[in-house]
Image (tube, grey):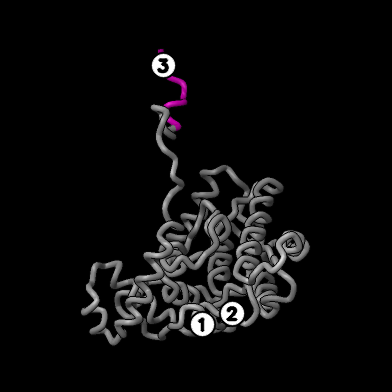
Amino acid sequence: MTSSPTPHPRLRLDPAPLATRLERTIEDTVRRFGLDGVALGVSGGVDSAVVATLAARALGPERVLALRLPYRDLGADGMRRAERLIADLGLRHETVDITPIVDAYAASQPGIAWHRLGNVQARVRMLVQFDKLTQHGLLPIGTGNRSERLLGYFTEHGDDAPKLEPLADLYKTQVWQLAVHLGVPHDIVSVPPSAGLEPDQTDEGDFGMSYREIDLVLAHLDAGFDDAAIAGLGVERAAIDRVRARVVASHRKRVPTVAPAVQPTGHDVTLFLPRAG
């Protein structure tokens, strides 16, 4: 595991009540939307393993559809870890090979780079999840975390599409803490994080720094600490600048859809309910 066994106090959490809170959120959201359960992609990474475990505890494994969505042989080891996790949790499961869909588009785009192809993979995977909403009445549930969102390390209209994101306010190092509490298998917790969208890729390789250091910077910037205070924790100024630059550059990926208000009612559904008299 690339996270520290003793995280900074600002990143330390009490996992038991947090797990209960997230389970209740999953249960209540599914009930409020009037759906039968959830569908999620299970990659063999720690984020999807934590969400799958929380969902199984909240709803029962029979109401969780785990989707294995391989592209060619990328992430083959992760798919094997996912298969074992699914069996351990007793989840409903389905494997959909997205290769023909992705390659059909790629064939129309000569010279498409891996970065673009990775975004296509992420969006096709979400296409499958939303189709399960139509097919089975299952709510697509996301697996993204706060570190990824702040760094812009996600695909718009892919990873960020689900209406329910249980881990979206947890830094990656906090997800690891929750995973240990939930009993996620060690081979999943310890594997280097990877989006699995191109060969030999890891998150921390892309960032040029570890999640432990990234989260230390993010948590202190979130809390309003200045650069001098963060550097006093042993972080190089260049690392602080690198993290800040990624957050600022990816801001557009986190803002709501720009929809100029024209009609007087906006989106307030209560205005459409029957009125007395």
Q: Amino acid at mark 1?
A: Gly
What residue span does the magenta drawing correspond to? 269-277
Label 1 close to label 2 by CB (< 8 Å):
yes
Label 3 is placed on what type of residue? Ala
Q: Which residue is mark 1?
A: 205
The label number, if any, that marks residue 276 in the structure image: 3
Q: Residue 193 falls in which quadrant of the image?
A: bottom right
Q: Amino acid at mark 2?
A: Gln
Task: Point out which mark residue 229 bears.
Answer: none
Residue at image x 41%, y 85%?
Answer: 4
Q: Residue at x 55, y 80 (%)?
A: 202
Q: Earlier in the sequence, mark 2 or mark 3?
A: 2
Expressed as whole percent of the image width and height from the top left, the position of residue 88 reads: 65, 73
- Other-residue count near label 1 (Cα within 10 Å), few / some / many at <14 / 14–19 / ≥20: few
How busy is the neighbourhood of tag 2: few (under 14 within 10 Å), some, or many (20 plus)? some
Dot 3 crowding, Cα within 10 Å, few <14, some 14–19, many 20+: few
Magenta run includes residue 208:
no
Sequence-first disc among 3 and 1: 1
Residue at screen point 37% across, 65% down: 248
Q: Is residue 220 visible?
A: yes
| Mark 2–mark 3 distance (CA, rounded to whole Å) | 60 Å
Residue topped by disc 2: 201
**Residue 234 image offset from top left, x and y in percent:** 28, 87
